Image (cartoon, rainbow, N blue to C red):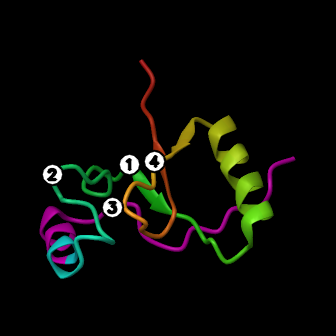
Amino acid sequence: KHPIIKITGVGYRSYDLQRQLWLSDKNRYANPDSSMHVEALAVDVDQSVGARRLDAVRRALKAEGWYWGAAFGDIPHHSFRLLG
């Protein structure tokens, strides 16, 4: 049985919003030209559950076709990978 996964942010961000975020803190937010939020293919996952629980959440998401995509030290992201 998969753990309950709490989504803490939006999946979609407009290019302009992602650009504003990126310009405000380039260490925390992805460039809008490479951000999967602009394509609505990334979600923010609650990390306050602790490391052990977060590992279980990552495994559950992976089993459903999501992959870990945090590259910027940002709030943990799980980004949907389109297969095909």
Determine which residue is flagged by label 3.
12
The magenta segment is 1-20
Residue at image location 25% in from the left, 56% down from the top: 38
The image's mark for residue 33 is 2
Give the Cα separation between the discs numbered 1 and 3. Answer: 7 Å
Give the Cα separation between the discs numbered 4 and 2. Answer: 15 Å
SS label for mark 4: strand
Query: Nearer the N terminus, badge 4 or badge 3?
Result: 3
| Few, some or many residues within 10 Å of mark 3 (<14, 14–19, 20+) | some
Tell me which corner region of the image, top left, top right, bottom left or bottom right, holds residue 11. bottom left
Query: Nearer the N terminus, badge 2 or badge 3?
Result: 3
Residue at image location 45% in from the left, 49% down from the top: 69
Give the Cα separation between the discs numbered 2 and 1. Answer: 13 Å
Query: Nearer the N terminus, badge 4 or badge 2?
Result: 2
Q: How many marks?
A: 4
| On screen, residue 31 above or below 24 | above
| On screen, residue 45 above or below 71 | below
- Residue 10, given in percent of the width and then of the height, sits at 41, 68
Determine which residue is flagged by label 1.
41
Determine which residue is flagged by label 4.
79
- Looking at the image, do the residues carrying marks 4 and 2 touch, with CB atoms under 8 Å apart? no
- Looking at the image, do the residues carrying marks 2 and 1 touch, with CB atoms under 8 Å apart? no
- Residue 44, given in percent of the width and then of the height, sits at 49, 65
- Which-is-in-front pick, marks 2 and 1? 2
Classify the position of the C terminus by image quarter: top left
